[in-house]
Image (spheres, rainbow, N blue to C red):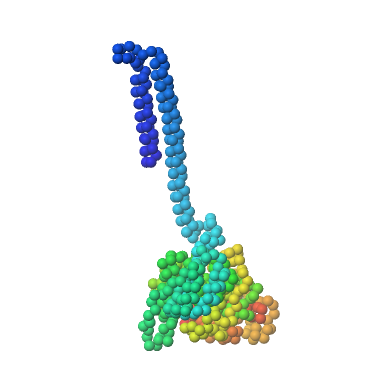
Amino acid sequence: MWRKKGSLIICGTLLFIAWNALLIFVLLGRTPVNEEGISFSSEQNAQSSNVIENLLQLIGAFETELESQNKILLQIQSHKSLWEELKKNSTAFRSRLDSKNFTDVSSKQLSSRVVIPILVMACNRVTVTRCLDKLIKYRPSPELFPIIVSQDCGHTQTADVIASYGSKLTHIKQPDLSEIPVSAGHIKFQGYYKISRHYRWALNQVFNTFSYSAAIIVEDDLEVAPDFFEYFKALHSLLKSDPTLWCVSAWNDNGREGYVDPSKSSLLYRTDFFPGLGWMLLKEVWLELEPKWPASFWDDWMRHPDQRKDRSCIRPEISRTLTFGRKGVSLGQFYDKYLRFIKLNTDFVPFTEKDLSYLEQSKYDQAFEKEVYSSPAVAVEDLKNGKLSGPGPFRLQYSSAQSFKMLAQSFGIMDDLKSGVPRAGYRGVVSFFSQGKRIYVAPPVGWTKYDPSWS
């Protein structure tokens, strides 16, 4: 439409000039006479001819200029069409980028562009500085990894500490600090109810108010490893593409010093147990969980089959977080016996440069089962007495909740089960390191599913 209007204007202008030129030519071409009817001299006729010639040259110049302008208009119109085509292609390209089936752009390139906020759950610990200082120290980019501190409790001293970081982070505050009505038997668990309420509010802020597509959640009593951000950045694309995964955790429940292989800092596992303690969640999973979010004990609720839906998490051999908060609503449960001995990774592993496709379920399950069940089954006494020869791995077999607990307690790994799933377990198998050898605590061959009554 724009091109047609431009052409009509040019044609109209040319016709107008040509018509006026013709009138001038006719008028000036007649032999002029004076009032007495006497013709002008030949000199005057020559002057008139010069005027006509000059007018014709001027008309020619106009025509040349108009042709030039017409070409420019045509070029602009063609560029406009090209621009519209580019815009159309760009929209299609972005749509393809959003598709899980798009394979022309590598996952590394996509991961390098994604923004993943760190949501720090805070309350009344002024020692939150230990957590924040390490996050700020190790994060590679404030733009790609913005820090959001969500504070509950209304503790003024903690609020002042968080505010002192200024523009290095975003400080939000839970507006509802009221007591939560609970049954008489749950009054002592009031803190767990408030934590669950805070998580719901804070995650809604991250995903709905700030509109992020993923988030890494840490508590205010966690210290992070130097490659904490590298770890999550590398695993983001795998979490997005593999529907059998629903979280990535930085934590190994059995990651105490002496229970992990120090030479395997890059080793990663799938686990059916939700570890928490520094974990990444996608918005689509939150939208699934939020409508049925529990009033309390949210982490154990996450471990229930109705939420897990046979999905797994990724966890490391050596933890990328360390908890330093002995005091809290759990009153130090597990802290003195297990948590304070967790080994924090100190070596930077360039995960984004590694091929992590071995963690995809179809590849992982086949290799995992082969390694576990091709390893020889051994007696507890032989392992305890150091009578095993060879580098391993070796297998300890259990067949019931009771036999699992006995094995776990014998070797100092965590013995509790949640909906039948052991901590750090995958397909019923728990891996740990002992006396320099890899040990698998495993159910019999042919395991099919967990028994929720094992709790």
Work out whether residue 419 or residue 233 is closer to the camera in this orientation and state it. 233
Furthest-front residue in this view:
35
> Is residue 33 at all visible to an observer of this figure?
yes
> Is residue 308 at all visible to an observer of this figure?
no
Residue 61 lies, in percent from the top left, at 44, 29
Please report the residue visible at 36 percent of the width from the left and 14 percent of the height from the top. Answer: 40
Residue 121 lies, in percent from the top left, at 47, 75
Q: Is residue 141 above or below residue 30?
A: below
Furthest-bottom residue in this view:
184
Work out whether residue 425 or residue 248 is closer to the camera in this orientation and state it. 248
Q: Quadrant of residue 254?
A: bottom right
Please report the residue visible at 40 percent of the width from the left and 86 percent of the height from the top. Answer: 187
Q: Quadrant of residue 378?
A: bottom right
Give the number of marks.
Answer: 0
Is 256 placed left or right of 20 in the picture?
Answer: right
Q: Quadrant of the N terminus?
A: top left
Q: Is residue 205 above or below residue 454?
A: above
Work out whether residue 28 or residue 212 is closer to the camera in this orientation and state it. 28
Please report the residue visible at 45 percent of the width from the left and 36 percent of the height from the top. Answer: 71
Please report the residue visible at 38 percent of the width from the left and 13 percent of the height from the top. Answer: 41
Residue 179 lies, in percent from the top left, at 38, 82
Furthest-left residue in this view:
36
